[in-house]
Amino acid sequence: MNVLITGASGFIGRHLIKILDNDDNDYKIHAIFSQKKLNNKSSKIKWHKLDLFKDSEVEELIKKIQPTHIIHLAWYTEHGKFWNSQKNKDWMNASIKLFKVFKKYSGKHFISAGSKAEYFDGEFMEDYLNSSFEYNETDRPEPDTIYGEYKNLLHDKLIKLDKNKKSLVWARVFDTYGPYEDEKKFCSYAIKNCISKKQIICNNPLLGMDFLHVYDIANAFKLILEKEFLGTINISSGKTITLKFISEYVTKQLNCENLLKLNHESKDRRQICGNNDTLKSLGWNNKYKIEDGLDDLIKFYVEEHE
């Protein structure tokens, strides 16, 4: 198996690289980075600096290494800005070109990261403030952000390009957390504020989200690769955790309960998760329960702070 991973130095990619590097397999693993590669000394990983928006360079690399499998994780993910950025359109177009070149050189499986944002979640809509959503892969996508729209549009276009339906995997990733995530994301925000003795504000304490530790997400991609799975699949925990639980757990572990401010006036009680039966049917189980995962992230930041 000759595997090419885009976004290999990103949040999910760096964990996937580590898992594949430590795994007992005979894969050839090629990793793409655009600015800075990971400090990885393994001879097993071949790093390639590549701008995915430069078509000729993309084709040159694909022609050279001729990957049998691609795990496409690269995308625009600047916190707070990616949701409604037009850069999503650029990434969709670059992804389509990558898929075409991959198929041109006889690529076998193209595993692309989709998002829970492709599903309807009722955000900011009063009629859905007390709703529960459990999404199956067969549910019709109804995105309400530009990010979700272009992820979904990319999926539609790749399906049409994959005429024999023997190449495409579309993995919809739900809520992520873990070491090396953007520090503005809620779990990291709460932990870092505790360590710095700053107030933690939880605006929607009863909002339930489907949090999954990045190790378990990366391991899901590894399993999808190994099992030669084809089709659409949710990468999710299958249950919801409220922001209240997370913030109270973190502040208790770090002895800073006095810094937590819960917005008790919030009416947002939505519960949103992804059904993960398909993923579990491949033999996947999560290593990190939410408490274990938060402990891991707390340890990461405490050691960084020392």
Image (tube, rainbow, N blue to C red):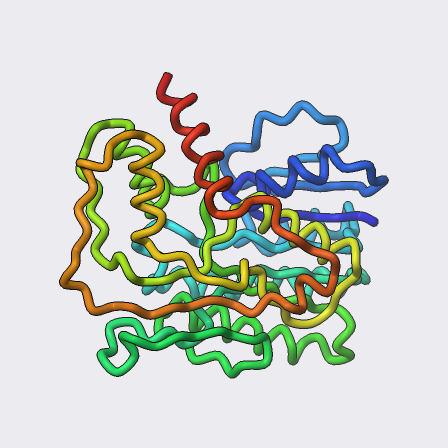
Q: Position of residue 70 (x, y in %)?
A: 70, 55
In the displayed structure, 252 sits above or below 115; it is: above
Residue beneath the point at 21% across and 42% down: 200
Q: In the orientation shown, which residue stands out farthest toward the top?
A: 306
The answer to whether residue 50 shows anywhere in this view is: no
Q: Where is residue 47 in the image (x, y as percent from the top left)?
A: 66, 35
Residue beneath the point at 49% across and 60% down: 174
Q: Nearer the viewer, residue 146 or 57?
A: 146
Q: On the rendered structure, is 185 left or right of 226?
A: left
Marks counted in the figure total: 0
Q: Which of 3 and 188 is in front in this view?
A: 188
Q: Where is residue 241 in the image (x, y as percent from the top left)?
A: 41, 57
Residue beneath the point at 67% across and 68% down: 278
In the displayed structure, 81 sits above or below 41; it is: below
Q: On the rendered structure, is 285 left or right of 199?
A: right
Q: On the rendered structure, is 63 left or right of 191?
A: right
Residue beneath the point at 54% across and 63% down: 238
Q: Which of 93 and 294 is in front in this view?
A: 294
The answer to whether residue 102 shows anywhere in this view is: yes
